[in-house]
Image (spheres, rainbow, N blue to C red):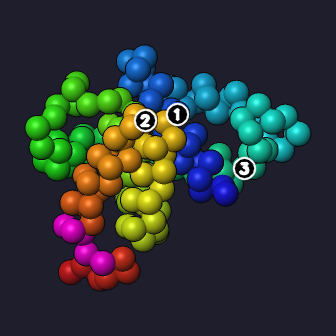
Amino acid sequence: MARRRARELAFQALFQSERGGFDVLDVWDELRTELVLDDGDDTYGEGLDAETVQLAERLVRTFAERRVSIDAELEQLIEGWTFGQMAQTDLNVLRLALAERSALDVPGEVTVEMAVRLAKKYGGEDSGRFVNGVLAKVLRQAPPHGAVVV
């Protein structure tokens, strides 16, 4: 549950940053100050604990640090679309998935499944299929989870 909520929080920060043209870390800092940790307030659904917020922050910071390389990788993977033509939801779900791949020790298949769920929840009718197709290319190019890369 913590990872799912952390992904959603990180996605919200990326999406708000992109839509508003603000630095993603500034957006995250503002979002984080709005969060209430375990005091019974259910503004964001179930209560958020420190672990969830820390994990979301790790994802956001990883994206902020690797944004140029993440965007470059996506530009190579996405055929026939520019970032300006894509739905912002889809773009930011993909960005988050690539950040997660760098930040967490999670099997690629899990990252793809969670990204597809986010895309279906927040995106359009075809978002899940689109995100799945792009991330399938990432998995085909990546070494198996746990493999040692020399």
Cβ–Cβ below 8 Å for labels 3 and 2? no
How packed mark 2 is, by other alpha carbons closer than 10 Å (few <14, some 14-19, many 20 or more), is some
* Residue on which disc 1 sits: 12
User: Up-down: is 107 above or below 38?
Assistant: below
Instruction: Residue 95: tell me if it is visible.
Output: no
Q: Quadrant of residue 14?
A: top left
Q: Is residue 3 in the magenta section?
A: no
Q: Amino acid at mark 3?
A: Ala
| Alpha carbons under labels 3 and 1: distance apart | 17 Å
Q: Is residue 104 above or below residue 63?
A: below
Q: Amino acid at mark 1?
A: Gln
On the picture, is 81 further left or further right than 40? Answer: left
Q: Mark 2 sits on what residue?
A: 123
Q: Quadrant of residue 100?
A: bottom left
Q: Nearer the viewer, residue 37 or 65?
A: 37
The reply to whether residue 43 is visible in this rendering is yes
3 vs 2, front mark? 2
Q: Residues within 10 Å of mark 3 (few under 14, many from 20)?
A: few
Q: Quadrant of residue 45?
A: top right
Q: Which mark is residue 50?
A: 3
Separation of residues labelled 1 and 2 (CA atoms): 12 Å
Kindly indicate whether the residue at mark 2 contacts the one at mark 1 (C-beta within 8 angstroms): no
Q: Which residues are magenta?
A: 140-144
Disc 2, SS: loop
Residue at (36% x, 41% y) in the render? 127
Separation of disc 3 and disc 2 at Cα?
Answer: 28 Å
Q: Name the residue located 24 percent from the left edge and 41 percent from the top edge.
A: 71
Name which residue type carries label 2. Answer: Gly
Q: Position of residue 55 (x, y in %)?
A: 58, 52
Instruction: Locate the N terminus and report the quarter of the image it occupies.
Output: bottom right
